[in-house]
Each structure stands twice: as C-alpha cells, then as structure tokens.
Amino acid sequence: MVAALTLLRSSRTALQPYCLLLPPQPLHCRRRSSLSFNLEPSSFHAALKLSLLARPFRPNPIAARSLPPITAIFTGIVEEMGQVDRIGPSGDADGGFQMRIAASTVLGGVNLGDSISINGTCLTVSAFDLAACHFTVGLSPETLRRTALADLAPGSPVNLERALQPVSRMGGHFVQGHVDGTGEITSFVPEGDSLWVKVRVAPELLRYVVPKGFIAVDGVSLTVVGVYEDESCFDFMLVAYTQQKVVIPLKKVADKVNLEVDILGKYVEKLLNSRFGDANPTSSSSSS
C-alpha cells in the first residue's frame, strides 16, 4: 500500500481537490422500490450499437506508454445500483450523447462537474435534480466505443460510486474509472451461496491480470482467482452479499463487462519499458 501511495503521489494531477466530493448530505428522495429490467433497446439504441459496435468481439488493449492523468480515484466498492432513465442524443448542435441515471445515494453532496463511476467508467455530472432523484452525464464517442455503456437501454441497472474523499475508508483498491477494455462473460457457476464468474479478454489485456491480484469489473473491485492463458480468461467469485449489491449477476453469458486492471501493473510496465525498451508496445489509450 505504501508503494501504491508513492506511485500515485508522483502524478502531478493525482487526487486534485476539484475532483473530490463534499461529505454526503441526507436526501429526502423516495428510493425506487424495485428495478425494472426492461432491456428492449430503442431504435436509437439499436442504431448506436450498429454504428459504434458492429464488429466481432475484440476487447480493447490498454496503452502501456500513454497513461491517462489521474483526476479521480474510486475504491471499487459500489454504493448503490442506479437505473438508466434515458440514453440518447443530447439535442445540442454539437451532436453529443447523454445518459440520465435514477439514483439517490450518490446524489448526496453532488455538484456539477463531480465524478461518478458508472459501471466502472468515470463520468462527469453535467446536470442533476435532487427532487426527481436523477443526474445526467455526457458520453463521448470514444467512451461509447471503448466501454460497454452503448449496450445500456432505459431500465438497465448500473453500478454507481462517487469519487473517493481523502477521509474515506479504502475498502477495495485504487480504481481510476479509466476503462482499459471490455471482456465477455463466458460462464456463471454457483458454489454454495457464492457464484463463480469467468470472463474472456484479449491476450494484450490478460497479461496484466494475475491470480490474487485486483481487477475492476463494471467498477466492482474484485480479486482474481485464476488466470487461464489457453482460454484467454480469468475468473473470480462473488459472495452472497456482493451478488445482491452489484449488476454482474443480472447479466447473461456473452454479455460484455467493463474492465480496468490494477494501475500498479501499468506503472511498473512503463518504468521497465523506459529502462529496458518496449518489447510489446500497444497503441490504444484508456477511456475516461
């Protein structure tokens, strides 16, 4: 942990004050009693998937040479499951896209410009309504291409977490919300009240995944159990409590998940490459 803190402090933009949330304030908004899982995509949703993701499964590798600046830090401990209210064009002349999320807990102390992790993707709050219990974020074309957010539709549940405060407990690991690529769920296998989940990823990304190491899956801090090089897969186990608090068990085999590997692996690789040369360079950059 000391090594991790030392590495993070070396970034000039690490934990910038403007990215940290104020202490949460109590909200008097009525929580939704249940989530609706009506995942039928709208015509916009179908068109978006065709234009951005109409290609065979090919997770995006991370960039070893160009690491994004750290502007917010998360722990991978999901605060609540929200629900997509709306996703589509923003209506602005610039042709952007927006997503509106129904939530309550993460609206505590919210301000415009705050960072909230949505399925592991760090996004900026562009509007919010405390009375109606929802907030809005913008979605760039690169974010839609690199993450699984384009698969969402009105009614989709999502994992939510506010950016870390300096006084917060570190229940998980350092998660930036910069998605390195996507993986594909290949199996769910129950064992007692726990659940084994196996995910397939590109070899370029699997090389950063190690047994007993950390990985963020849809923004959830998880411990890798096994790595299977011949299958290009890794697996992890969800205990009963976690299964009730995150989105992953609600997905199906072949669904995509957002992945962020442990930042320490990226820094170590960059330091080694700068000293000994890069024998296996990559060219993609992480999403923010």
Image (cartoon, rainbow, N blue to C red):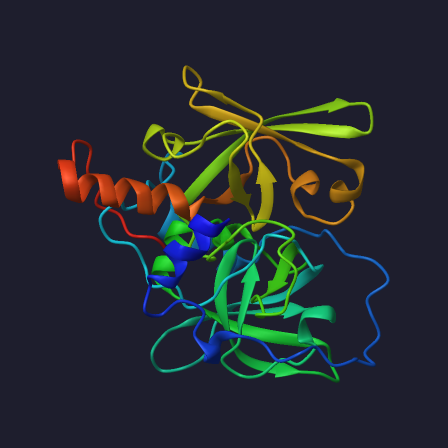
Q: Is residue 93 left or right of residue 187?
A: left
Residue 30 or 193: which is nearer the viewer? 193
Name above or below for residue 117 compared with residue 199. Answer: below
Q: In this view, which residue lies farthest toward the top? A: 230
The image quadrant that residue 278 belongs to is top left
Q: In this view, which residue lies farthest toward the left? A: 277
Q: Residue at x 26, y 47 (%)?
A: 284
Q: Is residue 89 left or right of residue 166?
A: left
Q: Position of residue 181 (x, y in %)?
A: 40, 44
Residue 193 or 158: which is nearer the viewer? 193
Name above or below for residue 95 compared with residue 173. Answer: below
Q: Residue at x 75, y 49 (%)?
A: 245
Q: Quadrant of the C terminus?
A: bottom left
Q: Is residue 147 left or right of residue 172?
A: left
Q: Position of residue 79 (x, y in %)?
A: 70, 60
Name above or below for residue 156 compared with residue 133. Answer: above
Q: Position of residue 1 (x, y in %)?
A: 51, 49
Name above or below for residue 252 compared with residue 86. Answer: above
